[in-house]
Image (cartoon, grey):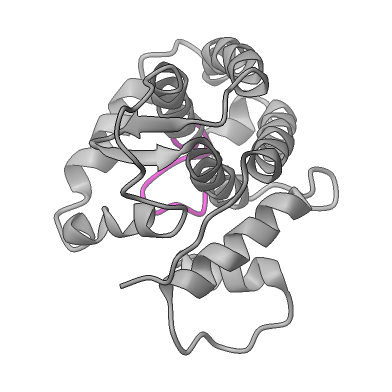
Amino acid sequence: MPRPCTVSLDESRGAFLEELDRFHDAIRTLDDHALLGPSRAYGWSRLDCLVHVRMGLQELLAGIPARATTPPDTDAASYWTMWETTADADPVPGILMTRRTASAYSRPRHALEHLDQVIAGLQRAVRDMPDSAVAFQGHVLSAGDLLATWAVELLVHHYDLNTSAAKTPFASAAVAIGRRTVEALHDNLPKVNDDLSLVLVGFGRQ
C-alpha cells in the first residue's frame, strides 16, 4: 500500500499549469518531421505521445465539473495503483489505438490544433476550479490531488518527447510533486543525483 500523499489545490494548480505550459512549449518546437520521430514511450512517435496526452487532457477537462458527494477515496499517490492491475496486461491494443488515432491527421502538426483547444479550455477551468472532491475514473479525489496526478503525467510525457531540456525545461513544482509521489509509492528507491531522475526511475523511464 502506498503511503498517504495529499497535495493542496494551490500547490498542484500552480504545478499543473506550469508543466502544461512547458509541455505545450516543447511540442510546439517540433515540425512535422520531428513529430514523426520516436518518443521515449515504447511504440510511440512524438505525435502518438501528443495525441495520448491530448485525449487524457480532454478527459480531465470533462471530469473537472464532476463534483463528488462522497469524501475522497484516492490521493495523489494511490491514484497510480489503479493501473497496477493492468500493468502486466497486453499493451499492444492501447499502443495501436493511439497510433491509429494519430494517423488520422493529414499532417502531424495538425494535431496541435486540437491540443491547443483543449489546453485553452483547461487553463480556464483549472484557474476557476473550486477546492472540492471530484469524481474521476471511478474514484473520488480532492481537486488538489487530481491536478497533482496530472502535473506528474505531463512531466513524464514531457520527458517522453525527447526534446531539449535546456530549451523547454521541466516545471520544478511538478518535479517536486513527482518526487513526493514516487516516495509514497515505492520503498528502497535508488540513490540518484536529482529529483527528476528519481521521478523517472519511479515511473519506469530510467
Q: Position of residue 43 (x, y in %)?
A: 36, 48
Q: Which of 30 and 146 lies nearest the eye of the viewer?
A: 146
Q: Residue at x 58, y 12 (%)?
A: 121
Taking 183 as reference, is 100 above or below it? above
Q: Residue at x 36, y 44 (%)?
A: 72
Find residue 172 and report its image quarter: bottom right
**Would you say residue 157 sits in the magenta stretch?**
no
| Residue at (49, 30) in percent of width and height | 132
Using residue 95 as the reference point, say whether residue 191 is left or right of it.
right
The image quarter in which residue 102 lies: top left
Q: In this view, does 19 lie to the left or right of 149?
A: right
Please say whether residue 206 is visible from this viewpoint.
no
Q: Which of 1 and 160 is in front in this view?
A: 1
Specify whether 189 is left or right of 23.
Answer: left
User: Of all residues shown, which one is farthest toward the right?
Assistant: 166
- Magenta stretch: give its range: 38-49
Residue drawn where x is 57% and y is 24% of the image: 130
Instruction: Work out which quarter of the rendered image holds the N terminus and state it.
Output: bottom left
Prevalent SS, magenta region: loop
